[in-house]
Every structure is written in structure tokens, then in C-alpha cells.
Amino acid sequence: MRSYRWRSQAPRAAAGAAPRAASRGGAIRITAAATRATFSRAALLGSVWLGALATLSQGAAHATDGTWTGVTNAEWTLGTNWTSNPLVPDNTATFDTSTRTSVTISSSTSINTIEFTAAAPAYSFTINPFLIFSINGAGIANASAFAPSFINESFIFFNSGTAANAAITNNGAVSFLGSSSAGSSTIVNSGSGSLISFSDTSTAGNATITTNGGALTQFTSNGNGGNARFITNAGGTVDFSGSSGPLGDGNV
């Protein structure tokens, strides 16, 4: 197991040299693009993203706010579980005190802000397979003493905002886009082709990201590692070779 905290580095080595990045207590190799390992499931997930995103193309803004009640069942996408009934919130979803703290997402949906009040207990969220959960605004805002947990079996898109201090177990694909940040979250990229991607000007922030065997954590475009801590277990890959850094100068 390799554990290291990413720092901004000097520009990449000249062509022909094996690019490397300094790390605490050792070094991590930045995989050359020509010799990257093949991740069949990760490639499949990436190809599916573009088509899947079309199902959540933005139309007229509803700006619906709602507070979770869970009065009917555990399903996020059911309007009767929210104070905004019959509508499901797409602007701010607030989680306060509730007797139902395990929430399931079974259909594609989007939200701007997921807000946990100071009184909120520990919530857990399961994103079921074959859907998209898209976070488009400020992201997660947590005033409670508990870190919300997310088990992802499908696709999560952070199009902006932050993951705050969420605990995310990724068995599918998590994509940080735009200027989004992983915040101070704890993310486990479980393996078997699971994928975490940082693109555009997104950052890993101060997160702790564990990449298990068979999993890929990759940075493209101007995505950067921030001050995140990366733990890479045997067979896992953290790949910075597709990113030119936040300023486009090779410093990632």
C-alpha cells in the first residue's frame, strides 16, 4: 500500500524521460499516456457518460426547495417523501431530524445543494445502478456533527460545488467537473473497474482518496490533486498524465 499527499510539482520532465512526481516517503510514477493500463470497465463507464448525460439535459429551471421527511419510504425521487410534495427538490434538498436516515436513489435526478442542518443525524445514501445523480450547484453543505455517507453503484457528477466531508464508497463512476472540489471528503475507489475522474479545473482539494486494485483515479484537462492524500493499493492506478494542471503549465 502506498500513501502520499500530493503537492504542486515542477513542470513535467522533458519528452523521453519517465515523468515522476515527488511524494512523502517515496515517489509515484505518472503513467505515460502511451503505456496506460487498460481498464475495460472504466472505458465502458466513460463511454456511457456522454449518452447518459443527455437524459439530464437542463430545461427550464424549477428551483424547488424541499426538506426530507421520508414519510412514505426511503426513495429520494418520490415527491411524498419531501415537504415540497408532489415535487422532488432540484434546488436545495435539506436534511434535518428524521426517523428515516437511509435514503435510496433509484432514478436519475439532479440537485444543486444538499444541506444538512446542525440537528441532522448521520445520513446514508445509496445510488442504485444504471442512473445519474447530478450535483449542479454548491454541492454538499454540512452543519451537522456527522459526515454523510454515499454508496455509489452508478454515476455521480459534481458539476460544481464541493463534496465537503462526505464519505463516498465508489463502485461505479464519480466525475468532478467544472470548478468542483472533492473538499475534505473520504473517497474509496473500490475496484473492479471503478473510476474517479477530475477534469476541467476541478480539484481533489483536501480529500483522502483510496484507489484499490482494479480501480482508476485519473486527472485530465486542468484537473489537479490539490493537497489531497492518495492511498494506492496493489493493482490500483492514480494517473495524472492527462492533466496539464490548473494553469496549463504542467504543474498538477
Image: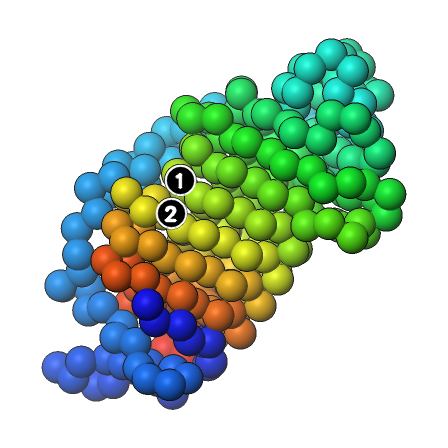
The image quadrant that residue 97 belongs to is top right
The image quadrant that residue 102 belongs to is top right
State the image coordinates of residue 91 (x, y, percent, origin top left).
74, 34
Q: Which residue is mark 1?
A: 171
State the image coordinates of residue 185 (x, y, percent, origin top left).
59, 57
For this rendering, which residue is in front, 239 or 74?
Answer: 74
* In the displayed structure image, the side of residue 82 where residue 36 appears, left or right: left
Where is 77 relative to 157, above or below?
A: above
Residue in the picture at 43% in, 33% down: 154
Residue in the picture at 21% in, 47% down: 39
C-alpha gap between disc 2 and disc 1: 6 Å
- How many C-alpha atoms fall within 10 Å of the one at disc 1: few (<14), some, or many (≥20)? many
Where is 21 relative to 63, above or below?
A: below
State the image coordinates of residue 62 (x, y, percent, origin top left).
74, 25
**Mark 2 or 1 closer to N-term?**
1
In which quadrant will I find the N terminus?
A: bottom left
- Specify the amino acid type for callout 1: Asn
Q: Which residue is mark 2?
A: 190
Residue in the picture at 38% in, 61% down: 219
Residue in the picture at 21% in, 86% down: 14
Mark 2 touches mark 1? (CB < 8 Å): yes
* In the displayed structure image, the side of residue 105 where residue 223 appears, left or right: left
Give the image's coloring scheme.
rainbow
- Under tag 2, what secondary structure? loop
- Under tag 1, what secondary structure? loop
For this rendering, which residue is in front, 17 or 5?
Answer: 5
Where is 55 relative to 22, above or below?
A: above
Question: Can residue 246 be seen by looking at this rendering?
Answer: no
